Image (cartoon, grey):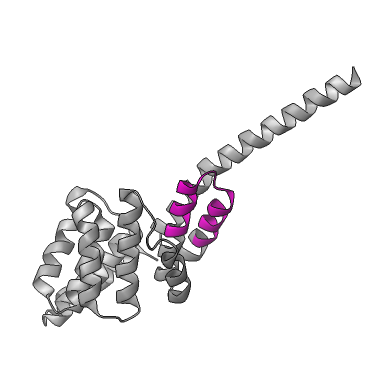
Amino acid sequence: MGAALGRVGGAIAVGLAIVATGALLLWLPRIAHAAFQHARYAVAARRYRAIAALAFGPGRERAAILSRAGCDIAAGHHAAAERALARFDGLPLDVAERVTWLNNRAYLALAAGRDPTDALAIVEQAVALRPDVPAVQHTRAAALVALGRFDEAIVVLDAMRAGGELSPALEALRCRELANAWEHKGQHDYAADYRERARLVIR
């Protein structure tokens, strides 16, 4: 009888552990994305690292690694992002993964001061797959600004909000890029206004 109860207790403990792990895997992505969307990149990176470690299946692990690479780029950890993104070169990715991978590669190229022509060519591949993703359009606009194509960039940045509200982090990036574009066009008041908007979005 005692052995039977012990087995039941063990089974319950295993079941509870599985449920707890499942709940953690549902909860962690939400709080990781929330941190990223509010530009808390170090916090988001730690949470994506935990997701990758706990992930059941390669798809979840790939998503976590790609997301963490985005955190590294935003935080200026370019070498770490480069290493993470290199892991996906040549892998068969689904559309969402490939869009994220391409967008991260393009944004990393811009952040690292590389040729913006190459960055634009990379992000245009992502745009061809998913033109509706605002983060991809932001990277495209940033490449256009870097190439001196300011009017085109402003059109892209203005259109980013057509699909609805953006996350605070992305809205701040959009405003900063608009400030850059208008500054280069000699419209200093517009530039100052967008810089202030960016400051107010992320405090």
Residue lying furthest left? 151
Query: Is 168 on the left or on the right of 81, as rendered?
Result: left
State which quarter of the image contains the C terminus.
bottom left
Q: Which residue occupies 10% across, 69% down? A: 152
Does 85 lie within the magenta span? no
Q: Which residue occupies 18% across, 75% down? A: 145
Give residue 11's position: percent from left, percent from top.
74, 27
How many marks on residues? 0
What residue range appears in magenta?
A: 45-66
Does 48 lie within the magenta span? yes
Q: Which residue occupies 11% across, 64% down? A: 155
Give residue 105's position: percent from left, percent from top.
33, 67
Give residue 175's position: percent from left, percent from top.
24, 67
Give residue 90's position: percent from left, percent from top.
37, 60
Visible residue check, residue 192: no
Q: Along the line of sight, which residue is nearer the eye, 198 or 173?
A: 173
Query: Is 157 on the left or on the right of 99, as rendered?
Result: left
Q: Of helix, strand and loop, which mostly describes the magenta segment?
A: helix
Visible residue check, residue 46: yes
Q: Which residue occupies 34% across, 57% down? A: 100
Q: Quadrant of residue 137?
A: bottom left
Q: Is residue 80 above or below residue 15?
A: below
Q: Is residue 192 above or below residue 128?
A: below
State which quarter of the image contains the N terminus.
top right
Residue lying furthest right? 2
